[in-house]
Amino acid sequence: MSTIAETADLLAPSRKLNLFERCLTLWVGLCMLAGVGLGKAAPFLVAELRNWEFGHGSQVNLPIVLVEVPVMLSVCGACNRTRWWFSPPTTA
């Protein structure tokens, strides 16, 4: 009888990380710098984006919603694909 860790090793495909995945920290840092730079260069744009709300008086910023919804959907999809982690597949 195999353990869950052994089953995970057998089912998980091994692959190399692509350029985006290898440099993810760099991309995040560059995006943060770009955001700070944009905020300093165009403060009127930041003020306008703050006014975009997801419903009147909700205090939920629409650009944040547009960024977070795809992230949450991909997390839910990943959870559905790895459901075997909670109940390992049976081996014949």
Image (tube, rainbow, N blue to C red):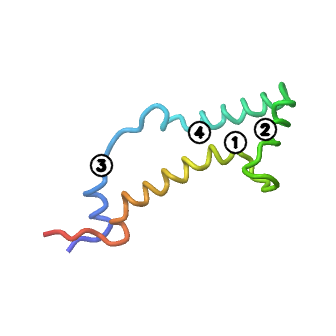
Task: Give the residue drawn at x 37%, y 64%.
Answer: 83
Q: Where does label 3 land, which residue?
A: 13
Above or below 3: residue 29: above
- Element carrying mark 3: loop
Is there CB contact under 8 Å for labels 2 and 1?
yes
Q: Please, which residue is most extreme toward the left here?
A: 92
- Marks 4 and 2, the one that precedes in the sequence: 4
Amino acid type shown at disc 4? Thr
- Element carrying mark 4: helix
Q: Neighbour class for label 4 at 10 Å: few (<14), some, many (≥20)?
A: few
- Marks 2 and 1, the one that precedes in the sequence: 2
Task: Give the residue drawn at x 31%, y 61%.
Answer: 8
- Element carrying mark 2: helix
Q: How much space separates mark 4 and mark 3, taking CA atoms?
A: 24 Å
Task: Give the residue drawn at x 83%, y 35%.
Answer: 48
Is there CB contact under 8 Å for labels 4 and 3?
no
Nearest the camera: 51 or 6? 51
Q: Nearer the viewer, mark 1 or mark 4?
A: 1
Q: Please, which residue is most extreme toward the bottom here?
A: 1
Quarter assignment of residue 27: top right
Q: Nearer the viewer, mark 2 or mark 3?
A: 2
The numbered mark at residue 74 is none
Q: Where does label 2 land, which residue?
A: 49
Amino acid type shown at disc 3? Pro
Q: Where does label 4 land, which residue?
A: 25
Q: Where does label 1 land, which residue?
A: 63
Q: Please, which residue is most extreme toward the front here?
A: 56
Q: Nearer the viewer, mark 4 or mark 2?
A: 2
